[in-house]
Image (spheres, helix red, strand yellow):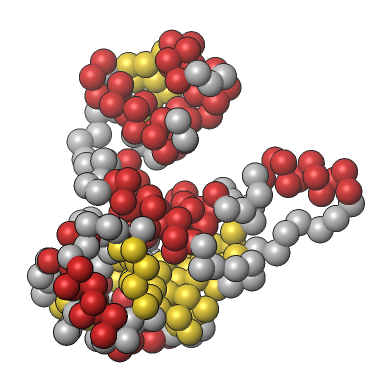
Amino acid sequence: MNRYARMNALLDAMAAEGHVDVDSLARQFGVSPTTIRRDLNHLHEQQLVTRTRGGAVATTVNYDLPIRYRRASHAPEKTRIGRAAAALVGTGDVVGINGGTTTTEVARAIAEGRPDDDAARHDSARHDTKPPEQITIVTNAINIAGELTVRRHVKLIMTGGVARLQSFELTGPLAYDTLAQIDLDYAMLGVDAFDPALGAKALDEDEARINRLMAERARTVVVVADSSKLAARAFARICPPGAVDYLITDTGAPLVAVEEIRDAGVRVIVV
């Protein structure tokens, strides 16, 4: 079980019982008590639990869990899509990533593709070599920034802006001004819909405006969308199909839609 699945399981246990015990969780998940303590400390920092001696209890704060801890629909497909998108990225690239459950998987796959921080540090000391060159990630997504902050080999740049509760994305003039000043190798865009004729779309016009600028600042635009987005409708247009280099989707995508998107000049990767 990876860390993200374990975090979800910890929160499920907390919701069911109201409290958790370090030793019991360590036996349940087959990891060390130190690992569980580290997980609980992280959740405590996010104000999702309150640490106690030997465990944790549920907080009394009443709010929805951040997007990174929700059980997303099409989760296995989004994991595959995230890995396929991450495979396009090379060392030294500058990658823009907007908010969403699929782009969160992209960010995780990019980060997990970097050497383990502790292992890299020991290896560097043993061989007297410099750490591997960083990948730079620019994001307006609060949850993605929170996960990547601790990644030693990821240089993280976060836009300013006003936080949107629905998506944990920063929008507005501050976000726009930040993106307007930088160039990207890749823009990894999660969307609410992708239409073969109209292109990438979002439910909110402010998010669409920021996403559009991120695409304009990128050398290569990659839309990551599970198959349900190819049959969806959304309010605001991000960019036309001609502005998209890659669409990465899953095997549930309608073949007719895939062919229409390819005919529009978009390279489609089905995973």
Q: Please indicate whether residue 114 sits to the left or right of residue 110 in the image.
A: right
The residue that appears at 51% across and 68% down in the rendered structure is 88
| Foreground of the two, 151 or 267 | 267
**Residue at the image point whose x is 50% and y is 79% from the top:** 184
Q: Say how many tags the image has.
A: 0
184 sits to left or right of 238: right
Q: Residue at x 79, y 41 (%)?
A: 122
Q: Position of residue 46 (x, y in %)?
A: 40, 40
Can you say whether 113 is above or below 174 in the image? above
Position of the C terminus by quadrant: bottom left
Tell me where residue 159 appears, x and y as whole percent. 43, 70
Q: Is residue 93 above or below residue 22?
A: below
| Residue 110 position (above or below residue 161) | above
- Across and down, in percent, residue 39 comes to 48, 30
Could you tell me if residue 168 is visible in this image?
no
Locate residue 118: give its quadrant.
top right
250 relative position to 257: left or right: right
Dividing the picture into quarters, in which one does residue 100 lie?
Answer: bottom left
Task: Name the residue at 57% across, 19% down.
Answer: 32
Q: Quadrant of the N terminus?
A: top left
Q: Quadrant of residue 246?
A: bottom left
Q: Is residue 75 above or below residue 132?
A: above
Residue 76: x percent and y percent?
A: 32, 46
User: Does residue 27 appear in this view?
Assistant: yes
Pick the front one: 265 or 108: 265
